[in-house]
Amino acid sequence: MYRFNPHTLSYERVEATWRDRLRRAVTTVLPGVVAGIGVAFALSSLIGSPQERLLRADVREYRNALEVMNRDMERAERVLSDIEERDSAVYRTIFGAKPVAEERRHVAPADYSRWEGKASGKLIESTMQRVEELEQRLYSQSLSLDEIYRMAGTKRERMAHMPAIMPISKLNCRMVSGYGMRYHPILHYRRMHTGVDLSAQPGTPVHATADGRVVTAGRGEGLGGYGVCVVVDHGYGFKTLYAHLQNVNVKVGQKVNRGTVVGSVGRTGLAQGYHLHYEVIQNGQKVNPVYYFFNDLTPEEYDEVLEASYAENQCLS
């Protein structure tokens, strides 16, 4: 190393100490090292290490798989929803069974807090929720189909015990009031009319609309307004009531078949004019009897009866 001497105006050789050499090495090499580290860090942040790249690829693959699974589950949910609707609206209606309770088809909310803040946590959480919900719905539907299968095994017997005809021959009666809110002719106010009123000549035979056993014959307890009446328990959740009768032809405990004459048309109880007040009770609920007039009416006759039952008029009882 040389140094300029201002006194002699010449360069003189100077022996470098180890400190000088170290300082020169540091000042020369350090910037390169710093730059290299910076470049390596920048590349690592942008590109990542081979292991990080593999992990990122795995995460993308898992995310894609979850999205595909969710699309598959969406299709499965649509199919299951269709089966559930058929179960409630078709299969169970045929056998007169209650629809499956909605709470049976849903699971209690689970704790997914462990996924909060994690990569794809929301997607994982929603997927797990859908899987559990789908599993519960499938399990519930499986139980329901097993039940329907058992009911189908007794279909012939069940159909014999389901109300399916008009209680009075269609040639001998006329629909005068249907199911719904109606004005009562004796009480003089609107109230729920829980059956249908069929006008007929006094003494006209009244028939049991399905097989069953008589549980009331005469003036039943708590049925004062119905006058002389007959109640038949058909089993499978069905009962029928025949009110305002002139007389009864059956006794309590007697088995009857569809078509058996249980009494005759009268006007006993809170009634105006000779007629039969007829009710269908399904699983403890009074339902529209017209929906069960399907065995002895043509489609055209059924439409006429249905239209007459919808008329907002005064009932006879």
Image (spheres, rainbow, N blue to C red):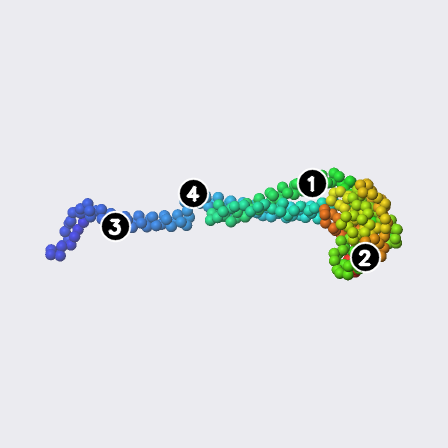
Residue drawn at x 54%, y 48% as measured from the top left: 126
Q: Secondary structure at mark 3?
A: helix
First in sequence, mark 3 or 4: give its number: 3
In the rendered image, residue 48, in percent from the top left (x then y), is placed at: 41, 47
Label 3, residues with CA under 10 Å away: few <14, some 14-19, many ≥20: few
Q: Earlier in the sequence, mark 2 or mark 4?
A: 4
Q: Quadrant of the C terminus?
A: bottom right
Give the labeled residue for mark 2.
Answer: 316
Mark 3 vs 2, N-terminal side: 3
At a point 48% along the width and 48% down the height, the residue shown is 116
Q: Residues within 10 Å of mark 4 (few under 14, many from 20)?
A: few
Q: Which mark is residue 286?
A: none
Indicate the position of residue 13 as horizontal and vertical percent values.
15, 49
Q: Nearer the viewer, residue 138 or 159?
A: 159
* Residue located farthest toward the left when viewing the structure as drawn: 7
Depth check: give the residue in front, 205 or 163.
Answer: 205
Which of the two labelled residues, at mark 4 and mark 1, occupies the earlier sequence position? 4
Q: Where residue 127 sits in the image (x, y, percent)?
A: 55, 46
Indicate which label's residue lies in the foreground, 3 or 1. 1
